[in-house]
Image: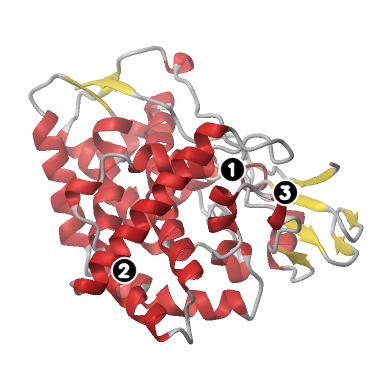
Amino acid sequence: RRMWIVTRHDDVDAALRDPRLSKRAPGIDAMPPALRNFVAHQMLGMDPPDHTRLRRLVSQAFTPRLVAGMEPRIQHVADDLLDRVQLWGHLDLIDDYAYPLPLTVIAELLGIPADDHQPFRHWSYAAVANDDPGGPVPQWRQTALTEFAAYLRELFARKRREPGNDLVSGLVTAAEGGDSLSGEELLAMVWLLIVAGHETTVNLIGNGMLALLRHPDQLALLRAEPGLLPGAIEELLRYDGPVETSTPRYSTADVDLPGGTIPAGELVFVVLASANRDEHRFADADVLDLRRADPRHLAFGKGIHYCLGAPLARMEGRIAIGTLLRRMPRLRPAVRLDALEWRPSLLMRGLRAFPVLT
């Protein structure tokens, strides 16, 4: 099938905000049931009014004020993870730090027991591993997503029996009423919160540290002036963000963008990574500059689908990278940086592993 790729900053900015580019995927009924369970009912694949209704249910859990209150706990998680590896002399930045930190945080917010975390990495990768949007869904992905759905249904049953002061318990209660959330939407909502709630931050931490280690002058600057960290996180998001391409859109009418017209009835992919390196928007766009005067980027999207967890991801990235630099001043790569491998995915940009010496 033909697809359109939107790459320039002005076009990407306009496309992300254009209601004629629908997130509702045609052909959902033809998807394997394991994938259809999630895609058909999650808000990232919906337009208003359904998107508005579902986002309203969870948006209060991710306000900047509530996220700010989570800072001590996130700091504790970061310190605890580094305490465990401090004496090793080495660690994998992904497996030992960037992955468990945001997963622990989102799981606690949702009310998922720590003992249940182990399979989440495989399940989450199955959710984002699509590198062939027009091709068949591999059996391993179908199996993983079926297991993920079965786990969530069992979790919901536990929350019905013993509700807690957590987001999943609140959503289960809303679904019981039936007016604001269906059972299928509950499943898709919690799946999305788990996956989006940690996948992006894993990559923010991993890609951010890779960028800093590739630019020793900028790393030295940040160590010398830790007050630059909030702005540095924005520049790292711009320079090599966690999401390469947004989830697909579908033109419901002819769409006029600054760079041209997309006809009705087309599949459209919007490339956030390209927009963030557009030399027409950013001076020296391919240069990492932690003092950049205007690093405003599109790494979290724009418009009604702007990343709900952006305040949380920013805080996690700031704490994770800041703590790592403060506690491990001799941190250095254990392998050549150009030997690191990226996980195959059309949507996400993240490393498979990142071994370092401490």
Mark positioned earlier in the residue sequence (2 or 3): 2
Residue occupying image coordinates x 33% and y 80%: 173
Horizontal relation, residue 34 to residue 346: left or right: left
Residue occupying image coordinates x 28% and y 73%: 169
Residue 292 shows up from this direction: yes
Horizontal relation, residue 150 to residue 296: left or right: left
Mark positioned earlier in the residue sequence (2 or 1): 2
Residue occupying image coordinates x 42% and y 27%: 352
Q: Which residue was labeled with disc 1?
A: 347
Q: Which residue was labeled with disc 2?
A: 168
**Residue 87 percent coordinates (x, y):** 7, 24
Amino acid type at image mark 1:
Leu
Amino acid type at image mark 3:
Phe
Could you give the CA–CA distance between mark 3 and mark 1, rounded to whole angstroms?
Answer: 10 Å
Mark positioned earlier in the residue sequence (3 or 1): 3
Do callouts 3 and 1 mark residues in contact (Cβ within 8 Å)?
Answer: no
Could you give the CA–CA distance between mark 2 and mark 1, rounded to whole angstroms?
Answer: 26 Å
Q: Residues within 10 Å of mark 3 (few under 14, many from 20)?
A: many
**Residue 231 percent coordinates (x, y):** 41, 53
Q: Height in image: 26 above or below 243?
A: below
Horizontal relation, residue 309 to residue 357: left or right: right
Could you give the CA–CA distance between mark 2 and mark 3, rounded to whole angstroms?
Answer: 31 Å
**Residue 200 percent coordinates (x, y):** 44, 48
Q: Residues within 10 Å of mark 2 (few under 14, many from 20)?
A: many
Horizontal relation, residue 163 to residue 260: left or right: left
Q: Secondary structure at mark 3?
A: strand
Asked whether 113 or 63 is in front, the reply is 113
Q: Secondary structure at mark 2?
A: helix
Q: On residue 269, which mark appears? A: 3
